[in-house]
Amino acid sequence: MRVFILFILVTSVVCASENAISATGLRASSFGDDGRLSRVFTAQSASGPFASPVVRAGRVEFYGKEAPNGVVAALEWEEAKYLKSEEVITGDGSIQLTTEDGIVSGKGFRCELDTERLELRSSVSYKTNAFRMTGEQAKIEFETKRGKRTDVIRHIAVVGNIVIEQTATAKAPFDRAESTFARYSADESKVFLKAPISAWRKGQRSVIDAASGFVEIDLKEQAPNKAPEPTPGAVTPRATEGTSR
């Protein structure tokens, strides 16, 4: 059973009724079955019903065993509604998920803190050392319970006006590509783009198609002294439009 402890660092607390709160300086800690700290929730202020207050300048830190300071991911937003019974935060503004591997951001969000699923409704961006991807909407699955610092973001599905660029791998046959759907998988270390895609290489545009319907970018590091020629037709039958766990 998870133990949940709430500490209110009181700068100002005014309860309009038994079921409402108005407070500043909030901090809540969650612990796993093994007694290890798993999550810390902080907010500059909160107001409204106890069951679903509006929290401002919020941050959730997810803890793991391997990180030097214990933190493997951090979620930050300006304003959100916190649904206490569901352990969900939802809002119309901006949110950002920061990990050692990269940063995911967007506007209009719903995040399930226990199941570690994040949905973004607009202005999606995912920046890593290997590539940068933008789109209109996304579903993200991340995993901090393993306690690892890397590969925290496990799966991303992005739809609408996808642009991917700055791919740091010799296996990508382009500098920039556009598609209508993209999927990133940490397990496979690949990005799958729905074909046909518009691709640019050294300023020249081309159209790349694939029989299976997806073009893939392999993000695995190249072996020393081995740089194979690009394979624009590389595809995978495992790529599908949607997310699964």
Image: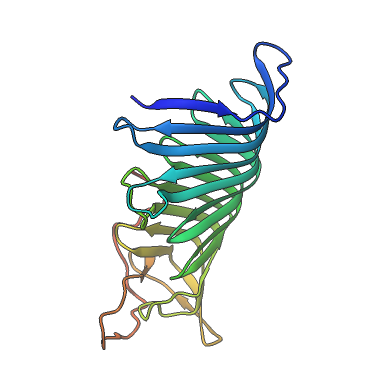
Q: Is residue 235 toward the left or the right of residue 158 in the image? A: left
Relative image position of residue 31 (x, y in whole percent): 39, 32
Q: Quadrant of residue 49?
A: top right
- Which residue is painted at 42% across and 34% down in the image? 114
In which quadrant of the rendered image does the C terminus lie?
top left
Relative image position of residue 159 (x, y in whole percent): 52, 54
Q: What count of labels does the image hold?
A: 0
Does residue 96 sit above or below 230 in this rendering? above
Relative image position of residue 224 (x, y in whole percent): 26, 84
Relative image position of residue 149 (x, y in whole percent): 37, 55
Does residue 25 sit above or below 171 in this rendering? above
- Which residue is painted at 43% across and 32% down in the image? 30
Q: Quadrant of residue 44?
A: top right
Q: 21 or 70: nearer the eye? A: 70
Q: 219 or 207: nearer the eye? A: 219
Observer able to see residue 161: no
How are the colours assigned in the image? rainbow
In which quadrant of the rendered image does the N terminus lie?
top left
Q: 114 or 66: nearer the eye? A: 66
Observer able to see residue 178: yes
Q: Is residue 51 toward the left or the right of residue 221 in the image? A: right
Q: Is residue 201 toward the left or the right of residue 79 in the image? A: left
